[in-house]
Structure formats: structure tokens, C-alpha cells
Image (cartoon, grey):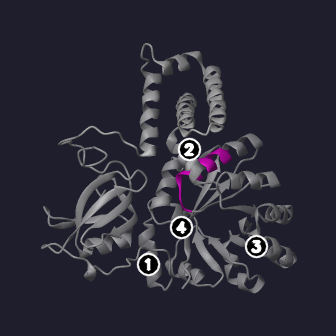
Amino acid sequence: MEHKNLIATMYLKNGMAVKSPLELESVGDFKTLAKLYNDSGIDKLYIFDLSDNDNEHDLNLHTIKELCRIVEIPVYGGGNINRLEDIKKILYAGCKGAILNSAKHEALQLAEEGGQRFGREKMLLSIENVDILFKHKEEVTKYIHKLVVMNENIVDTMGNVTSLPYSVIINDFNLERWADILKKDSVTGIGGNYISNPETDVMKLKMLLAMQGVETEKFESSVEWSEFKLNEQGMIPVVVQDYQTSEVLMLAYMNEEAFNTTLATGKMTYYSRSRQELWTKGETSGHYQYVKSLTIDCDKDTILAKVSQVGVACHTGNPTCFFTELVKKEYTGKNPLKVFENVYNVIADRKVHPKEGSYTNYLFDKGIDKILKKVGEEATEIVIAAKNPEPEEIKYEISDFLYHMMVLMVEKGITWEEVMEELSQR
């Protein structure tokens, strides 16, 4: 059975997330919302730009770009798309598709142009009524990949007027009605205010829909609990790791109930040996651990959990429970990202805490033009060194270039994390 999507909607006004097109009060920090949507079980995010001038449009596009960097779920952008250039900006910001507005007379022409330039699969069309499907059925079918139905009242007639797949935006929640809609063959998903509400337990909603016969994306283990090799207490140890940095956060234990609860809720749940009870990490502190993956080792006696950690993992306030160093032998770390981060941090510290005689501080003191001059010179040195058959020279010049590039990054306030996020979107 095809999985149906649960879709969050976000409306942007002046670069901020607001409640709806008619209610422009802020609904909180858009980055926090996006991170929650990304981790809580929501499958897709629709973003609508409510700008009414070019400056605000550019501001909202910047916000959309930031949002696409934060989340891993597919993002689709709509609102204020009037030209092919607007479609390009939406897609270049990181959106998987552009949602055109059928109320605008140029929508189908834009869909044709956008499809020819970027592919029909990136063209979506939002509709409030079925008029366009009657009047321009051939063009809609030819140029549009998917519809976004913004009016629940037309859902029951959609099957009579089009064979295109569509998602439905509904603000009020009624489980039976939602299930009826999602069971329709052409419906791919449902979204609206209820799903977008941070208080909504999305994984619980998926379980309720499953009881109504609607399949959604949920966690299902490929190995049965009965196949795990448990300790004397009937539990299995779980090593918990940050899914982005690979830092080991903590060690805990699961019994069968904790394991099944983790799968059902998408939040790491353990069994407390001291309190003799189940506990979901973050229930009291808010420092939830959202599941990204669970992997069993070769002996099936240990689980590795990769999680998105909210806040800190340790009850002491430390990011990880492993912070007390017992012994250490000096070594040179060669993890590329760690090396970049360490050098970057030293450069950033020099900017805040200048050190006499520091070449880095000399560059900062001379200003942006000097930094740019050095970046250009070092790039040229790489080109020259590349003509030399000996590899040592080019390694040296690349290292010089990367150092000066990091000085530029610090000067402009750009972090490695932002660069990695941008690269991951390519």
C-alpha cells in the first residue's frame, strides 16, 4: 500500500513565520519550527510567501533558503510566483518544487515555461475550485505534475475532473474525514494548521490513521525483538550518537516495551534500571532525542541509535555524558571536518581575542580588501603548483588557500556548518 504524507504548512511575512494569510501574527522562530517539523515525523513542508513587494519577496526567499538548509524533508515553495525567474529562485533556494497559484492567469504559461526549463515534476498547482480543471484540463494535465487542493469542499468531486495526484490542505482535524480523504487513490497527502501545530503528536496521529486503514511512513524494525541477544535483565544496551556530528552522547538500556515505544513515537525511550520504569528522554527537560536510525550490531546484542538531540544529552548540562577524561595520549586528529572546525575556531578566537604578533590578527586589522587579495593570490598559487608534477607543492598551496578562505569566512560570519548544509543541497 502506498504511504500517504503528512504535510506541514508555513506562511512567511517579512521573513517571519506567521499563522495564516489572514492572521499575520508570528508563530515563533521559523528555524525552531523547521527543526521540529524535520524531526517529529512530518513528511513534507509547504512554504507560502505572502510578500506584496520585491524587497519582501527577496527577504522571504532568503528565509526559504535558510529553511531548506535546516530540514531534510522535501520542501515545496509557493506564493508570489509571477515570472520564470521566481520559479528559478524558489528551486535554487532548495525547494523540490514550485507551487503555482491557479488564480493567476499566467499560471499555466509559467508551468509550461518552468517545466521546459526545470522539468514537469517540479511544477505544482494550487487550486481553490475546479474551474481551471474544466476550462484547461489538457494544459493542466500536460504541464502540471501535482495539484495542491486548498479547499476541502472540492475533494469529493476531484476524481470526476482529473486523474492528477493531489494533496489536500485542511485546517480542522477530524480523524474519520481525514482517513476517508487519504484513502482516495489520487490523494498523496494531507496538511494544514493541525499538522503544523508544534503541539500535535505527529507519530501518534500516524498510529491513529493506521487504525483507520491509512498507511504512512513510520518506523518498522527489520529485525524482530525475539532475535536480539538480551542481558540477564531482558534488556539491550543502546549507544546513542548525534546523527550529524557522530559524537557519542550516552549509553542507556531498552526492554521490549521501550523498543516498541521508540518505534511508535519516534522519540528515544529507555528503561531505567534504577527507577524500574520506562522513560522517554526529554519528557521532563524537553531535551528529546528524535530517531534518525537504529542499527543492530553483528552479534545482535547492542543497538546504535543515531538521533537528533534537542538541547543537551547529559543531565549535568554537558552536551554528552562522556566528558570526564580518564587517560589520554596526544594524537593528531585527521578527521577532515574536525580539522577544519578546529582551525576555524582558532581563527574566530583570534578575531575576538587578538594576540600580539598573530598573522591572523594582521589580516583582520588590514580588513576585507587585504583578506580578499590573499585569497586571490593563494588561489593563483594553486594553479601554478598544479603544473608541477610533484604533489607536495600543491598540498602546501591548498592548505594556504584553505586557511585564508577560513579567515574570510570568519570575517563574513560564515560557518563550516552553513557551507556543509549548502553543499548537501547540491
Query: In the rendered structure, which amino acid carries the disc numbered 3?
Result: Asn
Q: Is residue 266 left or right of residue 117?
A: left
Q: Earlier in the sequence, mark 4 or mark 3?
A: 4
Q: Which residue is mark 3?
A: 129
Could you classify mark 1 by the number of other residues whose Cα lies within 10 Å: few (under 14), some (14-19), or many (20 or more)? some
Residues tagged 1 and 2 counted as in contact (Cβ below 8 A): no
Residues tagged 1 and 4 counted as in contact (Cβ below 8 A): no
Instruction: Single out the mark in the foreground, 1 or 3.
Output: 1
Q: Which residue is mark 1?
A: 208
Q: Nearer the viewer, residue 40 or 26?
A: 40
Could you tell me which quadrant the C terminus lies in? Answer: bottom right
Q: Residue at x 65, y 43 (%)?
A: 14
Q: Residue at x 47, y 57 (%)?
A: 36
Instruction: Single out the mark in the foreground, 2 or 3.
Output: 2
Question: Where in the figure is residue 52, as x and y percent of width and height?
Answer: 75, 47
Q: CA distance from mark 1 to mark 4?
A: 16 Å
Q: Which residue is mark 4?
A: 43
Q: Which residue is mark 2?
A: 419
Image quadrant in which you'd find residue 79: bottom right
Q: CA distance from mark 1 to mark 3?
A: 30 Å
Q: Which residues are magenta?
A: 60-73
- The dominant secondary structure in magenta is helix
Could you classify mark 3 by the number of other residues whose Cα lies within 10 Å: few (under 14), some (14-19), or many (20 or more)? some
- Disc ID at residue 245: none
Q: Residue at x 65, y 26 (%)?
A: 377
